[in-house]
Structure formats: C-alpha cells, structure tokens
Amino acid sequence: MDRKHTSLMSTSEAAAYLNVTPQAVRLLTKQGIGQRVGKQWAFTQAELDAWRDKPRPLGGRPPKSARRPLPEVTPA
C-alpha cells in the first residue's frame, strides 16, 4: 500500500506535521488522540488538525490588573 494514500501517520510523522517533538505527540495519547496499532501509535490528519485548532486557555501569570494587592505591612 502506498503511504501517500494512507490516512494514518506515525508518531514521528505527526510530530513533523505539527512541528513538535515525538515526545509531545506521545502526550496527546493521554488526551485520547491517536489509536494504538500493535505497539505503535497512529494519528489521522483530521484529529491532529482538530487538536491544533482547538482553543486553549492562555497560561502564565495573570495580568497585573487581575492580581490581588499585597497586604499592607505596618511596622511594629
């Protein structure tokens, strides 16, 4: 079977497609993405596209306006 006509990608192919490391692609399996084929994982382009295009919350520190003010310290 010609690989161009196959809709499944290996972990390394999925990593190259998403421009991430193979380890990052393996973490996707914990989110229910991909399917086990023997001892390896296979991914469809459609499920990788859906994961990539899914909105995600922004990480990091909240903006200064959302932070609680520090309590005032009075000298003893």
Image: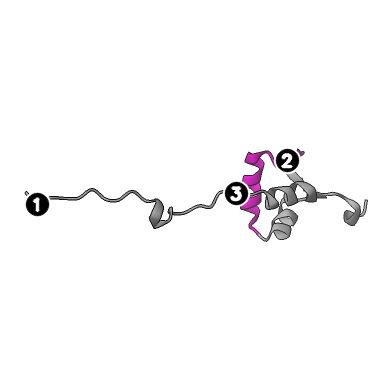
Q: Circle 2 sits on which residue?
A: 39
Q: The residue under label 2 is which amino acid type?
A: Lys
Labels 3 and 2: the sequence-earlier one: 2
61 sits left or right of 11 in the view: left
Magenta includes 49? no
Q: Secondary structure at mark 3?
A: loop
Q: Circle 1 sits on which residue?
A: 75
Labels 1 and 2: the sequence-earlier one: 2
Q: Secondary structure at mark 1?
A: loop
Residue at the outermost left position: 76
Q: CA distance from mark 1 to mark 3?
A: 45 Å
Q: Residues within 10 Å of mark 2 (few under 14, many from 20)?
A: few
Name the residue nearer the viewer: 48 or 35.
Answer: 48
Q: The residue under label 1 is which amino acid type?
A: Pro
Q: CA distance from mark 1 to mark 2?
A: 65 Å
Q: Circle 3 sits on which residue?
A: 56
Q: Residues within 10 Å of mark 3 (few under 14, many from 20)?
A: few
Q: Is residue 30 above or below residue 22?
A: above
Q: Secondary structure at mark 2?
A: loop
Q: Residue at x 88, y 50 (%)?
A: 6
Q: Residue at x 70, y 57 (%)?
A: 18
Q: Residue at x 37, y 51 (%)?
A: 67
Residue at the outermost right position: 1
Magenta includes 34? yes
Q: CA distance from mark 3 to mark 2?
A: 30 Å
